[in-house]
Amino acid sequence: MPAGSGSPPGWQPPFCWRAAQFGARAVVATLARLRVSGDVPVQLAAGPLILAANHISPFDPVALAAACHTRRLAPRFLAAGGLFEAPVVGPVMRRWGHIPVYRGRPTVTHAYAAAAAALAEGAVLVVYPEGGIGLAPDMWPVAGRTGAARLALATGAPVVPVALWGAHEVVPYSAPRGLLRALPGTIRRRPVVRVHFGTPVELTGVRPGTPGAARRVTDRILAAITAELAPLRADEPTRPRHHDPSRPVRPVRSRRDPSPPEVRP
């Protein structure tokens, strides 16, 4: 279904998923202080819509589910396939409409087809263009994978950048390992978790099917996320203050523009 067609969606979020989002708000309120800014235009919120977010912590989906609830959005997440293989979590995730991504397997392409079908039904999708938790030392977004861009080009769904900061202070990177040891300190500190819904990414001028189109759109999406993230971490422009000893540091995948907005000379 093309964006803005006004056709009724073919998929409606189950009541239990909306209830789980309400529960996510309670979880976040216990562990942190959620600050949500920005919004999604009403004409886009009905779907189809792609929410493209940066990924810094295992807690991101919980924070983002809670933030979306404040904006009356019940998105379907593209999530790591391993979650869907768990005895209880897996069936629940599927019932709620979330889509598994089995990276490293031949079936990984099934996620793209399922996501395109969900958008055709008018769904709101949460996609992490980085393809996983970014492990750059400065925690700015790294070079993205082209899946979100290819979905946008193929379906005409608009892309809203979502910037998130502070979730890395709530649970360790190694969670669930080390979670019980970390939670008492988190509850005492209740770090601020900020989620900002930005301005839709401008996709005009890129024709689907032309060479390099998906990469150009991916670069635009990551640039938009980075720009929306900069004000959220204005007092931490180069390195995060919070140190998580369980978080590995890996070489940064090349960025088209390696300098975040607030760091440029």
Image: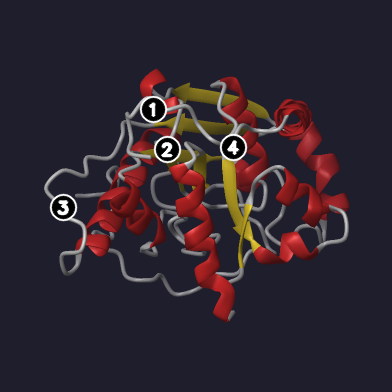
**Disc 1 residue type?**
Leu
Which numbered mark, 3 or 4, is in the foreground of this view? 3
- Give the mark nearer the N terminus: 1 vs 2: 1
Q: Is residue 189 above or below residue 247?
A: above
Which residue is under mark 1? 44
**Disc 4 residue type?**
Leu
**Disc 3 to disc 1, C-alpha distance:** 20 Å
Are circles 3 and 4 on residues that touch, CB within 8 Å?
no
- Give the mark nearer the N terminus: 2 vs 4: 2
| Crowd rating for badge 3 (residues with CA inside 10 Å; few <14, some 14–19, many 20+) | some
**Disc 2 residue type?**
Leu
Left or right, 183 with reference to 169: right
Which residue is under mark 3? 206
Which residue is under mark 2? 49
Q: Position of residue 237 (x, y in %)?
A: 39, 45
* Residue at the spot 53% in from the left edge and 57% down from the top edge: 114
**Disc 2 to disc 4, C-alpha distance:** 15 Å
**Disc 3 residue type?**
Val
- Give the mark nearer the N terminus: 4 vs 1: 1
Task: Identify the secondary structure beneath mark 3.
Answer: loop
Are circles 1 and 2 on residues that touch, CB within 8 Å?
yes
| Crowd rating for badge 4 (residues with CA inside 10 Å; few <14, some 14–19, many 20+) | many
- Give the mark nearer the N terminus: 3 vs 2: 2
Quadrant into which the N terminus falls:
top left
Q: Position of residue 121 (x, y in %)?
A: 49, 40
Q: Toward the viewer: 42 or 238?
A: 42
- Give the mark nearer the N terminus: 3 vs 1: 1
| Crowd rating for badge 1 (residues with CA inside 10 Å; few <14, some 14–19, many 20+) | some
The disc label shown at residue 93, or none: none
**Disc 3 to disc 2, C-alpha distance:** 18 Å
Which residue is under mark 4? 64
Image label count: 4
